[in-house]
């Protein structure tokens, strides 16, 4: 069975794109193909002018990059998972610093200084020595976002970042995503939070059956959907965030 078919879209620098659709439509698979956690069967992924995974050769033939090369390029994209994926045996500071130190070979002192600044930015100052088991779900997700940002990516990918959170914590994480969007970070977000997508995304892509069924400016796609399946999907979704809810982050 083919999970995705004929998928093609571009994301401009500083743009926020939300991907929505019913369960099983291929949203998470699409994100994993973008950064080659899942190897797509064809096509190209290009980030800031650099091909990742497959690249066209000068002779016109398509070449597959080595796993080593893909690993070198993957940090161009930060990935935030549904289940946080923090290392439980490491402190918050170690979770954030490990990638830049081990993968990018950056000086530990510089990385830890950056990590502390990120923690302060996300309202987690003082949590540097805590372990993930001592954090709330919202705090874990903010640490996961800080860990991804510490690699200084060109693009951030979020796979349903609020799906594993208690309802009262969802707003907290959405506010921080709004802050990231306002800062100019390029983001692709798989989400079921339609209210968030309406007020934060520049563009929305609706996947259905592994295909892009509709895409366009967020307010147009969500306010006046043309695809019958999208109209049906939106009718089943309960919007949880109003514009005012996302305007003033609070820690």
Image: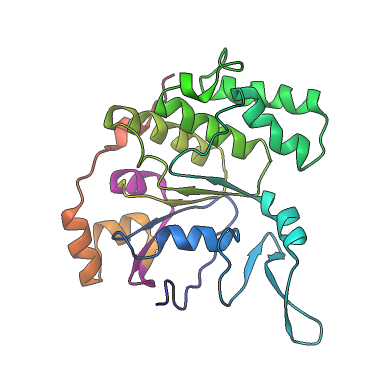
Residue sitting at the far front? 89
The answer to if 201 sits in the magenta stretch is yes
Residue 147 in the image: state x and y as whole percent: 61, 35
Is 211 part of what is drawn in magenta?
Answer: yes
Residue 101 is drawn in which quadrant? top right
Instruction: Report which quarter residue 36 is drawn in.
Output: bottom right
Which quarter of the figure has residue 233? bottom left
- Magenta span of residues: 194-214
Its colouring scheme is: rainbow
Q: From the top left corner, tell me how far across and down residue 29 is, in percent.
A: 46, 62
Q: Residue at x 22, y 69 (%)?
A: 229
Query: Residue visible at 21% across and 51% down?
Result: 237
Q: Residue at x 37, y 49 (%)?
A: 191
Q: Is residue 180 above or below residue 192?
A: above
Q: Locate residue 249, reporting x and y percent.
A: 42, 25
Residue 42 image offset from top left, x and y in percent = 58, 77
Q: Quadrant of the N terminus?
A: bottom left
What quarter of the picture does the C terminus occupy?
top left
- Total marks shown come to 0
Q: Residue at x 41, y 50 (%)?
A: 201
Please indicate whether residue 133 sits to the left or right of residue 71 in the image. Answer: left
């Amino acid at each position: 069975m083919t999970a995705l078919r004929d998928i093609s879209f571009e994301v401009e620098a500083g743009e926020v794109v939300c991907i929505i659709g019913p369960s099983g439509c291929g949203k998470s698979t699409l994100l994993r193909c973008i950064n080659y956690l899942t190897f797509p069967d064809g096509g190209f992924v290009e980030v800031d002018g650099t091909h990742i995974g497959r690249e066209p050769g000068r002779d016109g033939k398509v070449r597959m990059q080595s796993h080593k090369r893909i690993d070198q390029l993957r940090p161009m994209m930060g990935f935030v998972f549904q289940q946080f994926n923090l290392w439980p045996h490491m402190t918050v500071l170690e979770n954030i610093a490990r990638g830049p130190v081990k993968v990018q070979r950056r000086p530990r002192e510089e990385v830890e200084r950056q990590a502390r600044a990120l923690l302060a930015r996300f309202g987690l100052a003082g949590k540097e020595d805590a372990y993930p088991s001592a954090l709330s779900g919202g705090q874990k997700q903010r640490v996961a976002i800080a860990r991804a940002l510490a690699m200084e990516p060109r693009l951030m990918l979020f796979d349903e970042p609020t799906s594993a959170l208690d309802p009262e914590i969802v707003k907290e994480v959405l506010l921080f995503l709004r802050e990231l969007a306002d800062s100019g970070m390029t983001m692709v977000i798989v989400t079921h939070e339609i209210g968030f997508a309406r007020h934060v995304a520049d563009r929305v892509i609706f996947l259905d059956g592994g295909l892009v069924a509709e895409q366009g400016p967020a307010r147009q796609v969500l306010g006046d959907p043309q695809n019958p399946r999208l109209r049906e999907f939106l009718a089943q979704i309960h919007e949880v965030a109003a514009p005012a809810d996302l305007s003033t982050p609070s820690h």
